Image (cartoon, grey):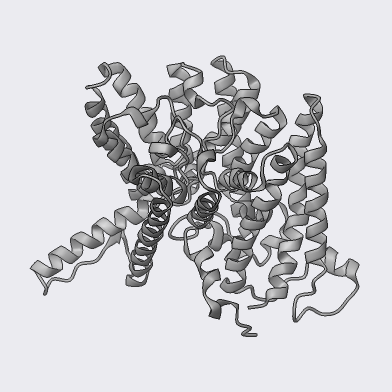
């Protein structure tokens, strides 16, 4: 592990990250609010970034400081060790710096870090009441989710050629899903293509919501947090505030798009129908339809058929895509309905989406693999392979998926146990863990749709922050940091 190189790269990233504070700073000036929190955040990000960037990576040719800054020298080959460390520490440090504006408006440090981590990881679990926040802070909350949705590293790979030049391991370490999708021969072009789709859909949702009577400010904020499947709202009632079925269905559609594979959306915009033949996308739509039908049936005991369908469609899409918006307090639903929603928290969105959870493709392949093992026990001489379309899935990939699933459940169980031991009821413990590990946001019980996470003990908030962090980067990237041999110098 080249630790100096990791710190140097992290410093360059934080220096460039300071630019994003200009957006909420502009809103604070426009709304005549105090711009100081964002000015200090810019200065702090630059200061820490420059300090770390001055650390010379081992193996770098000694040269003038100016040349090292202009050329952004990188080692000839970035290994996955360095990539995992850079991505994990980047998300952690950016969440810490992103908490500065909250601290400077009087929020305690742990709550500020919780809100920032929840934003960047697109979890949407909140400890704040939106109506009590300045508009510029609301914009910052929404922007953190929009930036975190497609990925912070992917954004900088798209903007800065020096990072994209040898940053394929970074892309792989951050990009959600089983495999990295490369749309273009050049990595930077792939990142740009993904962001073009992301920006287009964001603008389209802003215009659609605005045309439906939503204020421009609310339309911007909710578009930022819908496509990113984040779920932060400018209102405590979330989407229920608007009480408009057209707004609800619009948000549901864009949340479903956010939970889809953006590579397939890119091909769709290019005129290709590849998305409709993709097995994961078909499974994704099938899950949504299947669980919507079940919830609609269950909820007819509480609502008429129209309202049951209305609430069930929205909450199925919102929870499965890990967006986390609500149109009703589903904590008041029947136990069977809540069990369905809890299951959806685990499934999550598609690979290559902004959604969290285990991901549809993993569930799809695990089901195939389980069926294959059952058939193998019944017919041991018959050779069968797990397929994805016409592709035979290698055993190594299936082992990775099985390991991911086991680790995911292990983290879930341990985290739930710690919360339960701390004095919280079982429903609160397991749903808060599922909601943060899957980057969903609202859970049940004391973490329910009508609640905020402010009443949790400080150490539990930090544990939930860890869940958000490890869940957003899909376990391996973060957990590898806790293996001592990972940090050993090997070159």
Residue at 54% x, 44% y is 122
Tell me if residue 358 comes above or below residue 75 in the rendering: above
Q: Whole-percent x and y of residue 198?
A: 57, 40
Number of numbered discs = 0
* Left or right: 242, with 413 as reference point: right
Q: Where 36 falls versus 12 (above or below)?
A: above
Q: Residue 137 at what x, y percent from top left?
A: 69, 34
Residue 201 at x, y = what percent?
56, 34
Q: Identify which residue, 144 or 400, lies in the foreground.
A: 144
Q: Nearer the viewer, residue 437 or 450?
A: 450
Residue at the image point whose x is 89% and y is 69% from the top: 65
Picture quadrant of residue 401: bottom left
The residue shown at (74%, 56%) is 14
Tell me if 465 is positioned left or right of 284 in this view.
right
Residue 453 x, y percent position in the rendering: 51, 40
Q: Quadrant of the N terminus?
A: bottom right
Left or right of 452? Residue 164 is right
């Amino acid at each position: 592990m080249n630790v100096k190189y990791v710190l140097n790269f992290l410093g360059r990233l934080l220096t460039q990250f300071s630019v994003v504070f200009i957006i909420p700073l502009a809103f604070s000036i426009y709304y005549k609010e105090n711009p100081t929190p964002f000015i200090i955040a810019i200065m702090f990000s630059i200061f820490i970034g420059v300090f770390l960037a001055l650390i010379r990576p081992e193996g770098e040719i000694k040269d003038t400081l100016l040349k090292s800054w202009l050329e952004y020298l990188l080692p000839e080959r970035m290994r996955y060790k360095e990539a995992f460390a850079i991505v994990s520490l980047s998300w952690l440090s950016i969440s810490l710096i992103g908490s500065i504006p909250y601290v400077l408006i009087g929020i305690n440090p742990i709550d500020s870090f919780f809100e920032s981590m929840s934003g960047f990881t697109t979890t949407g679990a909140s400890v704040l009441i939106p109506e009590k926040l300045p508009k510029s802070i609301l914009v910052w909350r929404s922007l953190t989710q929009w930036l975190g949705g497609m990925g912070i590293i992917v954004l900088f790979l798209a903007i800065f050629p020096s990072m994209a030049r040898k940053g394929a391991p970074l892309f792989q370490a951050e990009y959600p899903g089983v495999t990295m999708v490369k749309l273009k021969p050049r990595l930077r072009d792939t990142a740009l293509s993904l962001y073009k789709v992301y920006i287009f859909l964001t603008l389209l949702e802003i215009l659609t919501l605005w045309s439906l009577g939503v204020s421009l400010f609310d339309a911007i904020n909710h578009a930022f947090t819908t496509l990113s499947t984040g779920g932060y709202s400018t209102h405590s009632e979330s989407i229920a505030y608007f009480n408009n079925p057209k707004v609800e269905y619009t948000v549901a559609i864009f949340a479903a798009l956010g939970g889809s594979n953006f590579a397939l959306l890119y091909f769709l915009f290019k005129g290709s129908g590849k998305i409709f033949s993709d097995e994961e996308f078909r499974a994704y739509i099938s899950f949504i339809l299947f669980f919507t039908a079940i919830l609609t049936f269950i909820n007819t005991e509480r609502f008429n058929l129209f309202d049951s369908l209305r609430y069930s469609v929205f909450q199925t899409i919102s929870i499965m895509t890990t967006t986390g918006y609500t149109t009703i307090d589903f904590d008041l639903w029947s136990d069977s309905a809540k069990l369905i929603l809890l299951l959806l928290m685990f499934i999550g969105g598609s690979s290559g989406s902004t959604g969290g959870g285990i991901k549809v493709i993993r569930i799809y392949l695990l089901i195939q693999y389980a069926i294959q093992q059952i058939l193998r026990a019944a017919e041991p001489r018959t050779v069968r392979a797990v397929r994805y379309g016409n592709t035979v899935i290698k055993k190594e990939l299936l082992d990775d998926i099985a390991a991911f699933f086991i680790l995911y459940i292990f983290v879930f169980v341990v985290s739930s146990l710690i919360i339960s031991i701390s004095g919280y009821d079982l429903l609160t413990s397991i749903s808060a863990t599922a909601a943060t590990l899957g980057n969903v946001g609202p859970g049940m019980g004391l973490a329910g749709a009508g609640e905020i996470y402010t009443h949790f003990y400080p150490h539990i908030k930090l544990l939930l922050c860890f869940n958000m962090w490890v869940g957003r980067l899909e376990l391996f990237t973060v957990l590898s940091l806790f293996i001592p041999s990972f940090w050993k110098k090997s070159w």
